[in-house]
Amino acid sequence: MIREIVVYPDKRLKLISKEVESFDGALHDLLDDMYDTMRAKNGVGLAAIQVGVDLRALIINIPLEEADGEHDQPKENTLEMINPVILEKDGTEKFQEGCLSVPGVYEDVERAKHVKVEYFDRHGTKHVIEDDDFLAIAMQHEIDHLEGKVFIEKLSYIKRKKFEKEWKKRLKEL
Ligand code: CO
C-alpha cells in the first residue's frame, strides 16, 4: 500500500526515531508499504519517518540497469535495515543527492566514502554490511533521517538560503 510522503519542512522530519523492539507483522507491513511508496515515487531509499512513522527502519533499493536501458527495483533486492548503527566510516566523497521528502531538489553533499553498518533484518537477525560506493552514500542519507536530519541541512549557508527561498515558492505552487 502506498503511503503519503512527509514533505519538508514538516516537523516530523526532525524527530529522532525510536528503536524497533518487535519484529512483527506491523513492522513487515510498514516495510512492504515503504517499498510500494518508494517505487511509486521513483526513489532509491526511504526512512520510516518519511511515511510518518518514527521507528528506526529504512529501505534502500538501488535500481538495476536492464539490457533494454530500463531500471528495475525488484523487491527481493531491497535492503531493509532496522536499528542500523554505523560502526566505521572513513574517507570523503561528494555525491549529488535527492530525497523524496524534498522532491525535485538535487544537491551535492559530502559524506564518508566508506562505511561499515550493523543492522537487523525484518526477522531480527543481525547483519553487518560494508560499502564504499553509492550504497554507502544512500545508507548515510537514510540513517540521517532516523536522527531527524535531511540532506539539505548539509549544504553551505549560502546554498541553504537559496534553497529555502526557492522551496517556499515551490510549496505555494504545490
Ligand atoms: Co531522504
Image (spheres, rainbow, N blue to C red):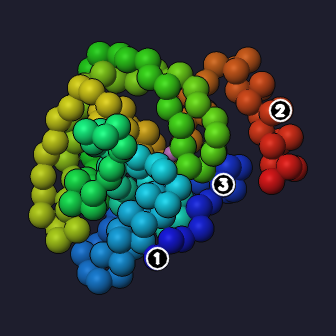
- Compared to 139, does 134 lie above or below? above
Residue 107: quadrant of the picture: top right
Pointer 2 or 1: first along the chain: 1
**Crowd band around label 3 with a 10 angstrom C-alpha radius: few (<14), some (14–19), many (20+):** some
Pointer 3 or 1: first along the chain: 1
Between 32 and 53, the one nearer to me in the picture: 32
Q: Any mark on residue 165, and which?
A: 2
Instruction: Give how far across and how far down residue 132 sits, in percent.
Output: 23, 26
**Crowd band around label 2 with a 10 angstrom C-alpha radius: few (<14), some (14–19), many (20+):** few
Pointer 2 or 3: first along the chain: 3
Instruction: Give how far across and how far down residue 118 sits, in percent.
Output: 19, 47
- Residue 18 visible, this orientation: no
Residue at (85, 49) in percent of width and height: 173
Q: Secondary structure at mark 3?
A: loop
Residue beneath disc 1: 1
* Of labels 3 and 1, the one closer to you: 1
Q: Amino acid at mark 3?
A: Val
Q: CA distance from mark 3 to mark 1?
A: 18 Å
Q: Secondary structure at mark 1?
A: loop
**Is the CB–ligand 1 distance for label 1 below 8 Å?**
no
Q: Amino acid at mark 2?
A: Lys
- Compared to 91, does 67 lie above or below? below
Q: CA distance from mark 2 to mark 3?
A: 16 Å
Residue at (45, 57) in percent of width and height: 38
* Of labels 2 and 1, the one closer to you: 1
Residue beneath disc 3: 7
